[in-house]
Amino acid sequence: MTWRMNAGMLLDLGVRLAALALAAWIALRWLLAPMKRLACAARALGDDIEGPPLPEDGTRECREVSRLFNQMQTRIRQQWSARDRFVAAVSHDLRTPLARLRLRAENLADSEQKRQFSRDITEMDDMIRTTLDYLCGTADAEAWVWLDVASLVDSLADDLREAGHQVLVRGAAAPLSAQALALRRCIGNLVENAIRYGGAADIRLADSAEAIEIAVHDTGPGLPEEELDKVMAPFYRAEATRQSRQGGVGLGLSIAQDIARRHGGDLTLMNGAAGGLVATLRLPRQPAQAGA
């Protein structure tokens, strides 16, 4: 009899414990659901600032956190909108006097002075455009398409050869999903850097099932090892570059790196075994993006 009572008590206790554990599990999931939703929204914020606001429900603490998150998202949107208006105004204000200078330069009688003025004005215009485009970051909205990378590189090389530059292309690559204009700008920055600081560009394509690699070799002096990572930073210019008369504002490699990361890839710099600098762009093969 005692054995049966003990068994009944143990069974009752087990049922109570199981019910308590189930209730605790349900309550924990209910409490954690808003926090998981907040974590997902925080991860998505960097990709889509225009995402919908979080519902302000759950416990008092969760409602307060969601409300603060929504306020932060609204303030970021306002700041981005103000930034875009500022960039548009600055672009107009800077390019208007440049247009006047270009017209005046066309009327110069001295052909050499005319050429020098035109070259400097073009360089200033390129620097303004590059800086403002970087600050605005408008390339993020470009559509994804299946892109023939080899044809893009060949077209870019042909344009530079027509301008009198020495550019060699080797290797082949199959198409992949990419932002065409952004990727052309990325590769163009690397090739133009090679021409500017090395005098020529040797582009080598390598393809595999996992990724495409585009290595741009130049014949310049290369960089000190401690400079290889620093030159990726926005507006940073190596000491040798600052002392020379080369143009640029130190954004070409930074923009190229941003575009590479947007494609899920990376950009690395290293000194070549035979001299010069090697910039290697690695683009992983991925399924076509939405809308491609």
Image (cartoon, grey):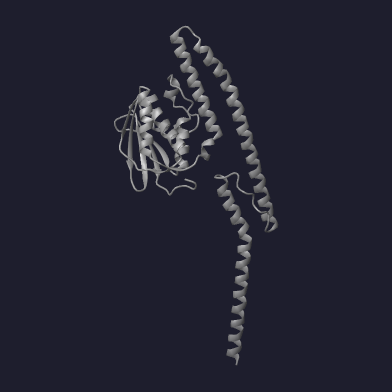
Counting from the top left corner in percent of width and height, residue 30 is at 63, 63
254 horizontally vs 216: left or right: right
Question: Residue at position x 33%, y 38% from top?
Answer: 205
Question: Residue at position x 60%, y 26% from top?
Answer: 90
Counting from the top left corner in percent of width and height, residue 71 is at 67, 45
Residue 117, can we see it? Answer: yes
Task: State the residue in front, 244 or 34.
Answer: 34
Specify the quadrant of the image occupied by residue 213: top left
Relative height, residue 225 to residue 247 (above, below):
below
In the image as oriented, which residue stretches furthest toward the bottom? 1
Question: Residue at position x 62%, y 27% from top?
Answer: 89
Task: State the residue in front, 142 or 192.
Answer: 142
Counting from the top left corner in percent of width and height, residue 5 is at 61, 88
Counting from the top left corner in percent of width and height, residue 102 is at 52, 16
Relative height, residue 250 to residue 144 (above, below):
above
In the image as oriented, which residue stretches furthest toward the left? 274
In the image as oriented, which residue stretches furthest toward the top? 109
Q: Total of numbered circles in the picture?
A: 0
Relative height, residue 52 to residue 138 (above, below):
below
- Which quadrant is the N terminus positioned in? bottom right
Specify the quadrant of the image occupied by residue 281: top left
Question: Residue at position x 50%, y 32% from top?
Answer: 234
Residue 278, can we see it? Answer: no
